[in-house]
C-alpha cells in the first residue's frame, strides 16, 4: 500500500502490461515525481468528498478504493486556488488561476508554494476565441501545457484535449498519447 503513503501508483491489474501508448520512454519527462510515472494504464476514480460553502474537495482512488490523491479547493479564495495532495495529505502541487488572464491561465507550483523558484508549469486555453469543434461523437476543448523551462511558449510541451459529451480527456506529447481519462464521472 505504498500509494497511501505517497509512493508508487498501483501495478497493472494482470501481470505485465503490453507495450502501448502508455509505455514510459527511456527518458521520461518528470514533472512532479518519478513515483507517478508508470509504463501501464492505471484506472483511477474521482470521488466528490466535501462540498460546503467554503470548500469543494475530491478524493482520487484506484479501482479498489485505495487512496492515491486528494484535491482541496477553497471556493472563495482569490485568486482561485487548489492543492493536490498525496494520499497521506502531503501537498504535491498548488494550482493558482492567474488573475486577468485572457486565456484563463493556471500556474502550477511545487507543494503549497507560489514562489517563482517552485514554478512547474502553466496551462491555458489553446486560443483566445474558443470555438466548439463538433465531430460525430464529441465536442472538444484544447488546453496547452507549458513547462517552466519553456519560457518562449512558442509550442506547448503537452496538449490536453477534453471531450465534453463523453466526459473524456486525452493528453498528448507531440502526436503521442501519454494519458487518457475515459468516461470521467464523479462518484458520489
Image (cartoon, rainbow, N blue to C red):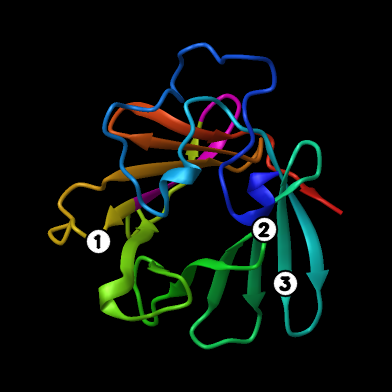
Looking at the image, residue 120 lies above or below residue 163: below
Which is nearer the N-term, disc 3 or disc 1? 3
Q: Quadrant of the C terminus?
A: bottom right
User: Quarter of the image holding residue 24?
Assistant: top left
96 horizontally vs 70: left or right: left
Q: Residues within 10 Å of mark 3 (few under 14, many from 20)?
A: some
Label for residue 123? none
The residue tagged 1 is: 148
Of labels 3 and 1, the one closer to you: 1
Can residue 173 be spotted in the picture? Answer: yes
Q: How far is the residue under mark 3 from the one under mark 1?
A: 28 Å
* Residue highlighted by disc 3: 56
Residue 148 in the image: above or below residue 164: below
Residue nearest the observer in this picture, 78 or 163: 78
Q: Is residue 127 magenta?
A: no
- Spatial distance from mark 3 to mark 2, Cα to Cα? 17 Å
Image quadrant where residue 146 sits: bottom left
Res 87 label = 2
Mark 1 Cα-neighbour bin, 10 Å: few <14, some 14–19, many ≥20: many
Q: Is residue 80 above or below residue 88?
A: below
Magenta stretch bounds: 135-144
Residue 47, x across and y down, in percent: 78, 53
Regarding mark 2 in the picture, which secondary structure is present there? loop
Amino acid at each position: 500500500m505504498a500509494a497511501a503513503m505517497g509512493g508508487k501508483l498501483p501495478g497493472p491489474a494482470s501481470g505485465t502490461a503490453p507495450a502501448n501508448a502508455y509505455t514510459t520512454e527511456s527518458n521520461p519527462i518528470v514533472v512532479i515525481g518519478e513515483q507517478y510515472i508508470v509504463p501501464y494504464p492505471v484506472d483511477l476514480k474521482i470521488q466528490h468528498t466535501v462540498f460546503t460553502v467554503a470548500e469543494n474537495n475530491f478524493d482520487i482512488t484506484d479501482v479498489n478504493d485505495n487512496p492515491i490523491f486528494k484535491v482541496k479547493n477553497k471556493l472563495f479564495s482569490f485568486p482561485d486556488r487548489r492543492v493536490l495532495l498525496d494520499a497521506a495529505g502531503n501537498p504535491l502541487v498548488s494550482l493558482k488561476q492567474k488573475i486577468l488572464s485572457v486565456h484563463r491561465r493556471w500556474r502550477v507550483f511545487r507543494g503549497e508554494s507560489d514562489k517563482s523558484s517552485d514554478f512547474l508549469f502553466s496551462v491555458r486555453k489553446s486560443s483566445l476565441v474558443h470555438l466548439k469543434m463538433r465531430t460525430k461523437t464529441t465536442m472538444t476543448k484544447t488546453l496547452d501545457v507549458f513547462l517552466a523551462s519553456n519560457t518562449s511558449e512558442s509550442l506547448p510541451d503537452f496538449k490536453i484535449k477534453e471531450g465534453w459529451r463523453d466526459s473524456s480527456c486525452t493528453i498528448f506529447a507531440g502526436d503521442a498519447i501519454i494519458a487518457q481519462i475515459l468516461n470521467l464521472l464523479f462518484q458520489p
